[in-house]
């Protein structure tokens, strides 16, 4: 029935099985990827960035706006998270589901984009690569803005292509208006989206020049200008954030080592310094295979296909290159800040392989492509094993396990004290009925700790302010620096990966 309908719709086109069942295949593979990502996420402990998102989203709207203004990210994601949690609750399943839905949406839109640009057969070849990428699966469940930013980016790209291909002026302007709205929404969600919009602008400029389009037909330029105008109300706040020293201290320059890590993270879920001899060989193979298939694809592709291959290359390459230049002035890179453009890179790899395999029936080609996918699946297995391992701190987030250890006692009157605001933020999510005390040098805190500024739970040493508690649980990383009066006796020390929990009882 479906084939008959498509034949009537496109009488000169022979409908293949893949085209007829493309949507079903795309939805099935996406559902599997979403399920895997969610299962991995639900086995993780919420870590600081996620706990910060939740704590901020629980604030009144005016306080959300005030706190984001002194942080490093724009406010839209936190407002969306607040609305979502108000409807579905603040449990981990509900909170992670918002990101999972965005992750699934980005895969679906990515598949539809590849079908529009390269055809259903080529898009089917690319699907396994976008649904098995460890990097995408990892940030698919994160209670942060990265999955949503990825969806906005690929959706804007899809709308842009449709606008460029539209036949009527009315459809064109409607699509360009939608594109402008998505560009503005993207920047209100994650400032690093600007890097992707710069890639769009460069590609559009290149296409307009090679096609010799007159300036009056550069409708895309008007759309981008409209998005800039839409961002103007927040621009003063953004400029003030550039110098507020709230950027995470783990940021670094984007050097050659970090370029290698983009590959090792996406295929092996490893940092470059962790890579063993075996995984080093795998990484070398991945880089060689990508270059080989990319060169082959550009040679075999039609002129129209080459134009869209350049778009996918720019999707990932321009943000990376711009970030390299920016970090020469100020360190501002961690791997998650590129998570919204990784999808474009994986799509490029999948489509390059598809074009090559479509033109060549060589068994060696099939073996090379299969081995590349196998490396990705190995990285996915490593992701399942490691979960949301914090590579910057070299530790597994374990606030959930710590909270389970102390919850009953703290509800019964025991005091919980964290070594610093970082661990206090993580524990607060899991211990909503328990006051979590913490130590810091100053009462005034900024950036991600701003919500704890002048908190009644701030303590100095010694910690007599805890009050009449007869039992204290102290949570720390590394060496204990807690100072208590002699009336407290240490009765136990329990380890949860890097986190230690000391229990003291008053005598």
Image (cartoon, rainbow, N blue to C red):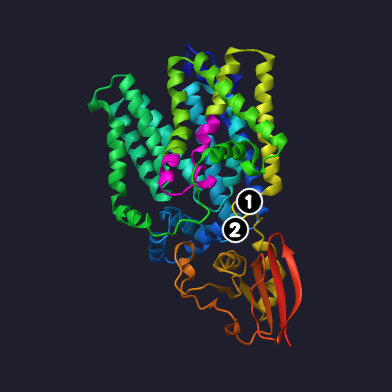
Q: Main secondary structure of the magenta part?
A: helix
- Quick one: label 2, few (<14), some, or many (20+) residues within 10 Å? many
From the top left corner, tell me how far across and down residue 11 is, in percent: 47, 13
Q: Is residue 85 left or right of 360 when viewed as pictured?
A: left
Q: Secondary structure at mark 1?
A: loop
Name the residue rendered at 46%, 19% in the picture: 305
**Residue 208 percent location from the top left of the image:** 32, 24
Whether residue 55 is visible here, answered yes or no, is yes
Image vertical order of residue 497 relative to residue 285, above or below:
below
Residue 371, image quadrant? top right
Looking at the rendered structure, the number of numbered marks drawn on it comes to 2
Q: Between residue 57 and residue 280, name the one nearer to us.
A: 280
Rendered residue at 36%/39% (across/down): 178
- What is the distance, in whole Å, between disc 2 and disc 1 at their CAs? 8 Å
Q: Residue 47's mark? A: 2
Residue situated in front as seen by the camera: 339 or 170 = 339
Locate residue 225: give its quadrant: top left
Q: Quadrant of the N terminus?
A: top right
**Mark 2 near mark 1, Cβ–Cβ under 8 Å?**
yes
- Magenta-span inclusion, residue 68: no
Q: Could you tell me residue 288's position as x and y percent? A: 61, 25
Would you place residue 313 above or below residue 150 in this image? above
Where's the C terminus, which quadrant? bottom right
Image-based side of 428 in relation to 486, left or right: left
Q: Position of residue 263 (x, y in %)?
A: 58, 36
**Crowd around label 1: few <14 · some 14–19 · many ≥20 (10 Å):** many
Asked which secondary structure carries label 2, the reply is loop
The dot on residue 388 is 1
Magenta stretch in the rendered image: 323-347
Q: Is residue 325 magenta?
A: yes
Q: Which residue is at 57% across, 37% downward?
A: 260
């Amino acid at each position: 029935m479906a084939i008959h309908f498509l034949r009537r719709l496109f009488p000169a086109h022979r409908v293949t099985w893949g085209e007829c069942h493309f949507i079903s295949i795309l939805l099935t593979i996406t559902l599997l990827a979403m399920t895997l990502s969610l299962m991995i996420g639900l086995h993780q402990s919420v870590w600081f960035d996620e706990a910060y998102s939740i704590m901020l989203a629980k604030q009144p709207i005016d306080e959300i706006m005030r706190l984001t203004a002194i942080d490093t990210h724009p406010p839209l994601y936190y407002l969306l998270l607040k609305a979502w949690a108000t409807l579905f609750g603040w449990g981990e399943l509900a909170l992670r589901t918002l990101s999972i839905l965005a992750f699934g949406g980005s895969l679906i839109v990515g598949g539809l984009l590849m079908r529009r640009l390269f055809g259903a057969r080529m898009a089917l070849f690319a699907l396994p690569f976008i649904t098995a990428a460890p990097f995408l699966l990892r940030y698919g469940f994160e209670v942060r803005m990265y999955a949503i930013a990825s969806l906005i980016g690929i959706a804007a790209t899809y709308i842009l292509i449709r606008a460029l291909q539209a036949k009527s002026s009315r459809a064109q302007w409607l699509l360009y208006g939608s594109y402008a709205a998505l560009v503005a929404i993207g920047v209100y969600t994650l400032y690093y989206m600007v890097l992707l919009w710069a890639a769009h602008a460069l590609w559009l400029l290149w296409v307009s020049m090679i096609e010799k389009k007159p300036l009056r037909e550069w409708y895309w330029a008007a759309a981008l200008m409209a998005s800039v105008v839409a961002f103007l109300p927040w621009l003063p706040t953004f400029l003030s954030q550039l110098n507020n020293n709230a950027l995470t201290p783990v940021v670094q320059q984007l050097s050659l080592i970090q370029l290698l890590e983009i590959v090792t993270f996406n295929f092996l879920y490893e940092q470059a310094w962790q890579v063993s001899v075996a995984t080093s060989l795998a990484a070398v193979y991945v880089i060689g295979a990508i270059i080989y298939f990319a060169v082959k694809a550009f040679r075999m592709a039609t002129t129209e296909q080459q134009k869209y291959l350049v778009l996918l290359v720019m999707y990932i390459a321009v943000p990376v290159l711009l970030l390299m230049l920016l970090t020469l002035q100020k360190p501002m890179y961690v791997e998650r800040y590129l998570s919204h453009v990784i999808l474009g890179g994986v799509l490029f790899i999948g489509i390059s392989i598809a074009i090559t395999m479509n033109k060549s029936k060589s068994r060696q080609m099939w073996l090379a492509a299969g081995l590349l996918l196998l490396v990705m699946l190995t990285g996915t297995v490593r992701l399942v094993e490691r979960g949301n391992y914090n590579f910057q701190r070299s530790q597994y987030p374990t606030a959930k396990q710590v909270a389970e250890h102390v919850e009953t006692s703290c509800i019964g009157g025991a005091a919980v004290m964290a070594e610093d605001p970082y661990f206090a933020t993580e524990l607060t999510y899991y211990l909503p009925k328990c006051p979590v005390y913490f130590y810091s040098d100053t009462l005034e805190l900024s950036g991600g700790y701003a919500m704890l500024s002048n908190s009644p739970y701030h303590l100095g040493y010694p910690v007599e302010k805890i009050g009449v508690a007869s039992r204290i649980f102290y949570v720390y990383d590394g060496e204990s620096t807690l100072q208590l009066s002699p009336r407290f006796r240490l009765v136990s020390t329990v380890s949860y990966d890097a986190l230690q929990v000391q229990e003291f009882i008053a005598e």
